[in-house]
Image (cartoon, grey):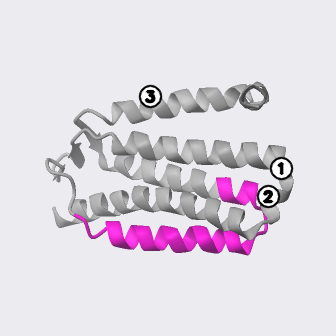
Amino acid sequence: MLSQILAHTPTWVFALFAVLVALGLSQMRTREVPLSRAAILPLVMVTLSLAGILNAFPGSLWALASWAAVLTVTTSLLSMKPMASGTMFHAASKRFTLPGSAVPLALMMGIFFTKYAVGASLGSRAELAQLPAFTVGASAIYGLFSGVFLSRGLRLWRLSRAA
């Protein structure tokens, strides 16, 4: 069954996977990034997450509500955490020093594999989209990953404002 799923996977999905792995690996080392670039990744990942829900469960208010609720709770809770040790904002250059972390890679892979698993599941059993447990569960997972990304973006934004 796995070979059938992989055989029916469009080529661009493998390219997207490679790009996300490369991007995630690049975040495992300490680096300096401009303020604008630090804001882009959370927004892109939240957008991909929302697009995953809207494509998989079009018109489902339960899916959207589940995603939004988990996103909001996760963002609220995690945005209270302090930034990782070594995170700094340099006001003069408007750049962040960000310590390396495997968390962004894990989150990107989480969103990617959730989207892939949901797509493959719906591709083989379209009726799953009508099951509230599946719809709400998948949407909650998307919301969780998005909330982690968004909270990090908010914490970076606050750090830049404090400087």
Inter-mark Cα distance, 2 to 3: 32 Å
Marks 2,1: beta carbons within 8 A: yes
Tell me the kind of residue under disc 1.
Arg
Residue 155 falls in image quadrant = bottom left
Q: Nearer the viewer, residue 9 or 38?
A: 9
Marks 3,1: beta carbons within 8 A: no
Residue drawn at (27%, 70%) of the image: 80
The prevailing secondary structure element of the residues shown in magenta is helix
Residue placed under numbered mark 3 in the picture:
22
Q: In the image, which residues are magenta?
A: 52-81
Tell me the kind of residue under disc 2.
Leu
Tell me the kind of residue under disc 3.
Ala
In this rendering, the answer to whether 106 lies above or below 55 is above
Compare marks 2 and 3 and give the one earlier in the sequence. Answer: 3
Find residue 125 and report its horizontal and vertical position in percent.
Answer: 83, 50
Q: Nearer the viewer, residue 137 or 20?
A: 137
Residue placed under numbered mark 2 in the picture:
128
Inter-mark Cα distance, 2 to 1: 6 Å
**Mark whose residue sits in front, 3 or 1:** 1
Residue drawn at (59%, 50%) of the image: 48
- Quarter holding the N terminus? top right
Marks 2,3: beta carbons within 8 A: no
Find residue 150 and report its horizontal and vertical position in percent.
Answer: 42, 60
